[in-house]
Amino acid sequence: MIPPLRRVRQSVGAAGPALAGVIAVAAASAQPTVYTEGVVAADHALASRAGAEMLARGGSAVDAAIATSLTLSVVRPMSCGIGGGGFMLIYDPSRPEGERAVALDYRESAPAAVGTDFFRTLDDPDASRFTGAAAGVPGTVAGLAEAHRRFGALPWADLFGPAIRAAEDGFAVDESYMRSAREAIRWYEADPSRKDRFGFVWRRLLRDGAVAEGDVIRNPEQARALRLIARGGHDAFYTGEIAREIVRAAQDAGGVITAEDLAGYTPRAVRPLEGEFLGRRVLTMPLPSSGGVALIQTLGALERYAARRDATLAQWGPRSPDYLHALTEAFKHAFADRAALLGDTPEARAAAARLISPDALDSIAARIDPDTTQPRGGYGAGLAASPPPDDAGTSHLSVVDGRGMAVACTETINLTFGSRVAVEPFGFCLNNEMDDFTTAPGAVNAFGLRQSDANLPAPGKRPLSSMTPTIALDRAGRVELVAGAAGGPRIITGTAQAVLNVLAFGMSADRAVSAPRIHHQFFPPVLAVEPGLIEPPAPAADAGPAEVMRMVRAVEDGRRIKEALETRGHRLGRIESVGVVQIVRRSGDGFQAASDPRRGGSPAGVRAGRVEADPRIER
Ligand code: DON
């Protein structure tokens, strides 16, 4: 095994020396690290560290989140960035009650030229995925600027340092980058004309198909964009040189974004959706994300269902068939409602309020049969879909600062490298978020989600999302948990399970994100299970007798779970990964943090005024 310190240096790549001065690497230990002055969990070590650097300089959780987001724009160009959008949930305990929680919606919006029939008139099956028409008006820069205006403590320009360094000095390609690269290279090879049409991603980010782990990727073009935005703020992106190049890139690739669309983009600041779970207040994202509705439905239904059976979730445990069955059934109800009712409209908002009402949660709980699944109609409208792709087009970051302010932020360009249409002079990809709309009645999106007319495109409308940035407050009103995920619809199921693992089962941050997960999105009618739950990994060749015995027991346990679920009527399938989750959870007066090993980032926090990376997560 590579010693932790070397692993940390490796993932820092060429930008490492610039940061080395502020970094002290915590010694590996069996005990979770508890950060007392703030911590950031992102899915890339450099991004977490960028945020922690701001915390160490006295920045707020929002400053840290912005620096982290900007760095992710550079080092995770397949996932998120200034060509995309996102949601940021902020909780600031120092403000008066009623002003403490804000949900910033900086989701991409449909350009003015996009009406209900837009994609049907284009006669191109790729139109909503890999053309300029796939791109919504990007929201990330506007969202970050608004977050800073409301909650920033450090000067705006100071937040750009780590991202600009990563873009100019370069960052090392890691295993997670390579997974996305391999997927994208296959797509280019399937139609080599794409190598010209989507040349920036092919040449620069995939190195003409020859990119390899350890390569250093530099992006001076994006560094230039970041410098302009550092100086000029929101307007530097939405008017002027960058805006002109966005319009040119989108329109040259068949899109319709105009200068007016960009100049008119505004983030929305709304009240978070609120639910209750085991005595905690759960704050999460309202529409146009379905994630918050589905999370509150799932948690609320599970708590009530357990109570109806005179039990608690903790008594059942995270690997019990009773729990896994009920969780699956709750997911199916939530996804059925998502498909039928949700979108960025006033009617859908009214429906969302009904769906999370106590009566509706009681009703789901009452409809879960402990012994069996329901016929298809028992969950809502019958819909068919294809399985979701393996995909990396989103990134979630969780932050707390030393004063107790928390940020849960999920950002995306939708699919891996978004639309693959790049704004080449500024080194970033445009999103393909338009595919999250109902592009034609009955059509499924890239994640196999079929949706209703409530989610048809319209000028200025924002496509329905699954992103689920979430903050839970304990009984004393303190931040207890910050969570969220990447992974399309698996964002909802992945986030819900991380929340349950902490709040219902009391797991440490590491265990809560690494424990195997399940996924059901109603259709396809398959309960997808990660390998570790019912098929444990084979023991190492040099495993001792104790380890072999442990494995034998794990195999038996897996078989027991499988049989119990199949007896209840679930059709089991296999899935490599149910989302990529980043959490921060309270531990006494400090916080533990975990970045999901499924993507291999690591958290970074502050103790005694110094930035510390957690080497235990660097495996
Ligand atoms: O907003 C959504 O729900 C999707 N655009 C998210 C896409 C995603 O998470 C890609 N996978 N990692």
Image (spheres, rainbow, N blue to C red):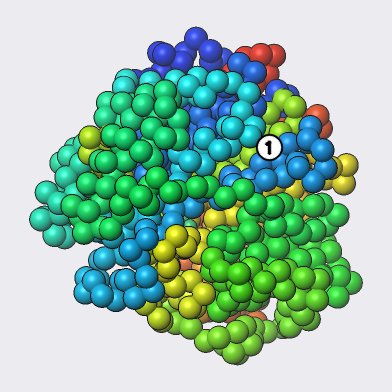
Q: Looking at the rendering, which quadrant does residue 432 occupy?
A: bottom left
Residue 331 on image: x %, y %? 62, 70
Position of 553 with respect to 233 (left or right) is right
Residue drawn at x 75%, y 27% as measured from the top left = 403
Task: Give the left or right position of residue 468, taking residue 422 as reference.
Answer: right
Q: Between 611 and 275, which is closer to the camera in this rendering?
A: 275
The furthest residue to the top:
21
Q: Name the one closer to the observer, 65 or 514.
A: 65
For the point 20% across and 41% down, the residue is 200
In the displayed structure, would residue 406 be above or below residue 455?
above
Residue at the spot of label 1: 406
Mark 1 surroundings within 10 Å by alpha-carbon count, few (fewer than 14), some (14 through 19), many (20 or more)? many
Q: Residue 19 at what x, y percent from top left?
A: 46, 15
Above/below status of 107 relative to 146: below
Judging depth in this view, the residue of 338 and 560 nearest the camera is 338
Compare residues 597 and 91 and report the one nearer the observer: 91
